Image (tube, rainbow, N blue to C red):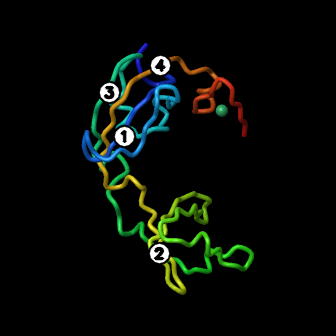
Amino acid sequence: MIVNKNKVVSISYELRINAKDGELVEVVENDKPMNYLHGVGSMLESFEFQLEGLKKGDVFDFMILAADAYGEESDEAIVDLPKTVFQVDGEIDEEMLVEGNVIPMQDKDGNHYDGIVLSITDEMVQLDFNHPLAGDDLYFTGKVLDVREATKTELEHGHVHGEHDHHHN
Ligand SMILES: [Zn+2]
């Protein structure tokens, strides 16, 4: 069985940035693989394109350019917000406001974004909402551990169900 639309794919991999021997940013081990439903947009399209047609036991080794991954870093994603935005019950949470901290934020439409605190002044906080991998070419090496048909329920939900977990919303 090969990797194509509506298959559940299990993979292990290493992700390095910018080169095959670049900085290691993520490791997914054989005994704790990543499982995803192929072809429904849960992974980068450029990533799924590279895995398409592989089968169990195949190894992979490819680079995705930043433009096809998380894009280039943008100045527009760096924003200054008044400190009052971070008030909880009238108090500013000073512990949260530390340079380098990642702060989960929500816009008026309920979309979630993680912002990294770049700097803090008396009145303002500067946050960087660029994806941590923006501007980076992604180098993946890994292995296809399993390919199976998705179940009917998985297709309805658009995601993989584990052996034990069960959720439902
Ligand atoms: Zn589900």
Describe the element under mark 2 as helix, strand or loop.
strand
**Neighbour class for label 1 at 10 Å: few (<14), some, many (≥20)?**
many
Describe the element under mark 1 as helix, strand or loop.
strand
Between the residue at mark 1 and the residue at mark 4, the CA separation in whole angstroms equals 19 Å
Depicted 121 relative to depicted 69: above or below: below
Q: Which residue is mark 2?
A: 126
Mark number, residue 15: 1
Mark number, residue 146: 4
Q: Find residue 138 and report its horizontal and vertical position in percent.
A: 32, 44
For marks 4 and 2, the one nearer the N-term is: 2
Q: Amino acid at mark 2?
A: Gln
**Is mark 3 in CB contact (under 8 Å) with mark 1?**
no
Q: Find residue 7 and report its horizontal and vertical position in percent.
A: 49, 22
For marks 3 and 4, the one nearer the N-term is: 3
Describe the element under mark 3 as helix, strand or loop.
strand
Residue 120 at least partly seen: yes
Q: Residue at x 62, y 59 (%)?
A: 110
Describe the element under mark 4 as helix, strand or loop.
strand
